[in-house]
Amino acid sequence: MATDLLEQLSRSEVPPPPDEFDRQFHQRLNQSLLFGHFVELAFRAIPFAFGFFARAVIGLLVLSLTGRFPPTSKEAR
Amino acid sequence: MTSLPPAGNQLCRGRRAREYGRLTQGAVLDLSELTDEQLAAETASEGSDGPAFVELLSRFRERIWRICFRLMQNETDANDAAQEVFVRLFVNRAKFEGRSKYSTWAHAVAVRTCLSIRRGKARRRKYETDATREFQHRHGDAQPTADPGLSMDLMNMLESLGEDDRAMLIMKYAEGHSYEELSGIFDLSISGCKMRVSRAREKLRQLYPNQLG
């Protein structure tokens, strides 16, 4: 019967995990976390910082040219 | 157990307080006594792979490795897959909602990871095989035809099934999971799991009537 043969699967030998498994895993985890942080820095943090400081520079220019502070988002509402 | 210092204790500041905190934390949180689910909740609140995740890693290392080895069929791929499984368990640690046992969730991640790695490899192999076949066709090389009934062992027979069916048979018969556990792992109903196992066995019987008839 197929079931009997399939039950032999549980008797098939599985070698133990390699001794270096934990170290390799932590290396891989560190790499993947580093990559994640890099992506976050490149696509979120740096654009946010650029936007934040660009607003300040634009505000400075507006102040220099018109003599008025540009309205903040709260005032605009 | 270490007793707590009185409120406003001047000693509980700075380095000494941190040392005291570690001591009391160690005394209160004996990780080996926590269940998998409690550890998972603790892991979700940890910023990095702290003691709770290390404890989970040590509890599940053998089980995940066994699943990966059985599904991947060789040590190199199993090692790669098992590491990927633990990376996913860590990265998605906050997504465990406790609706099933942690072991079921971890095994489901292991199966999905192995299947996606195997599918990727199969796609690459198919592309390479097609290129080789075309080369042999152009150069008139004869393709040796394997006799499926003679030298194939059981694992090779399982290779002739679809990836999901193969994984389900392995989890059922090699790992000894119940249909309830299989339904959690494969995200199917219990009757759906029973049907899939039955169909996979029937398909095997049709493919290898001499061995399984």
Image (cartoon, coloured by chain):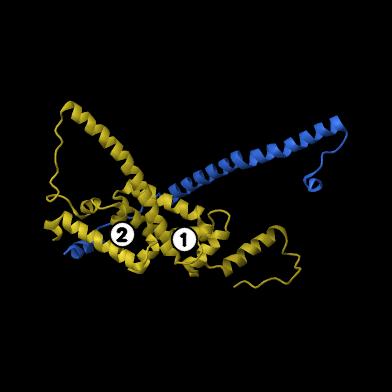
Chain colours: A blue, B yellow
Q: Label 2: how many residues lie within 10 Å, few (<14), some (14-19) or many (20+)?
A: many
In the displayed structure, would residue A42 be above or below residue B5? above
**Amino acid type shown at disc 2:** Met
Q: Write the residue at 47% across / 66% down.
A: B36
Give how far apart the Cα atoms at labels 1 and 2 are: 24 Å
Q: Write the residue at 57% across / 58% down.
A: B46
Front one among B107 and B52: B107
Q: Chain of mark 1?
A: B
Q: Secondary structure at mark 1?
A: helix
**Amino acid type shown at disc 1:** Leu
**Is B101 on the left-hand or right-hand side of A75?**
left
Residue B142 percent across, percent down from the top left: 14, 33
- Residue B122 shows which numbered tag? none
Residue A42 percent across, percent down from the top left: 59, 38
In the displayed structure, would residue B107 be above or below residue B122? below
**Is B159 on the left-hand or right-hand side of B61?**
left
The residue wearing badge 1 is B56
Tag 1 and tag 2 share a subunit: yes
Q: Residue furthest front?
A: A77
Q: Chain of mark 2?
A: B
Q: Write the residue at 37% across / 63% down.
A: B188
Front one among B205 and B8: B205
N-terminal-most mark, 1 or 2: 1
Residue B178 appearing in the image? no
The residue wearing badge 2 is B168
Q: Secondary structure at mark 2?
A: helix
Q: Which is closer to the viewer, label 1 or label 2?
A: 2
Where residue A34 sits, quadrant-wise, is top right
